[in-house]
Image (tube, helix red, strand yellow):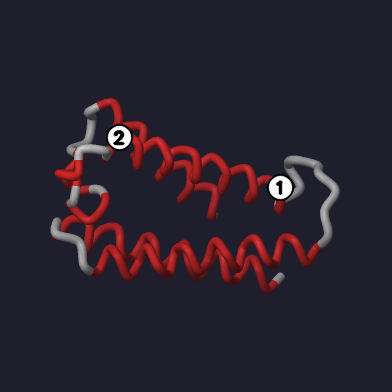
Amino acid sequence: MLHIFFSASLLFHIGVLMGIFPNDIIWGGRTDLGNWRQFEMISVGINLLFLFLVYWRQGILPLAARPQLFRIVFILMALLFALNTLGNLYAKNPLETWLFTPITAISCLLCFRISRN
């Protein structure tokens, strides 16, 4: 299920870069900084990394790794989503608060749950 969140997030961020979605609903509505495109490219890279890690954890990408590494990586991902959830709560754009806060909170819980298995 987590791969669905990351795939949708990846498509969303690509859509923002392509102008399909407005850029005022990202980064807490603070796109007046002028470097939102660079931030979006980082978001695309992070989502690709997360997709890779989820597929790795599911055994789709066969890589030898210790189980402790999975736990650490997914705990770090859960912490990142927890911080993102807090940031979404204080977004300037209400859409970001009401739509993306639950999505990042669910992603946080799923990452934490995966880290426990």
**Residue 23 x, y percent position in the rendering:** 20, 40
- Amino acid type, callout 2: Arg
Secondary-structure class at tag 2: helix
Quadrant of the image for the C terminus? bottom right
- In the picture, the quarter occupied by the N terminus is bottom right
Q: Residue at x 78, y 66 (%)?
A: 68
For this rendering, which residue is in front, 90 or 98? 90
Mark 1 closeness class: few <14, some 14–19, many ≥20 residues within 10 Å: some
Question: Which one is nearer the viewer's eye here, 31 or 86?
Answer: 31
Q: Which residue is mark 1?
A: 56
Amino acid residing under circle 1: Trp
Q: Is residue 45 above or below residue 82?
A: above
Q: Is residue 113 above or below residue 29?
A: below
Left or right of 13, for residue 25:
left
Q: Which residue is mark 2?
A: 37
Q: How many marks?
A: 2
Q: Residue furthest bottom?
A: 116
At 54% from the left and 61% from the top, the residue drawn is 77
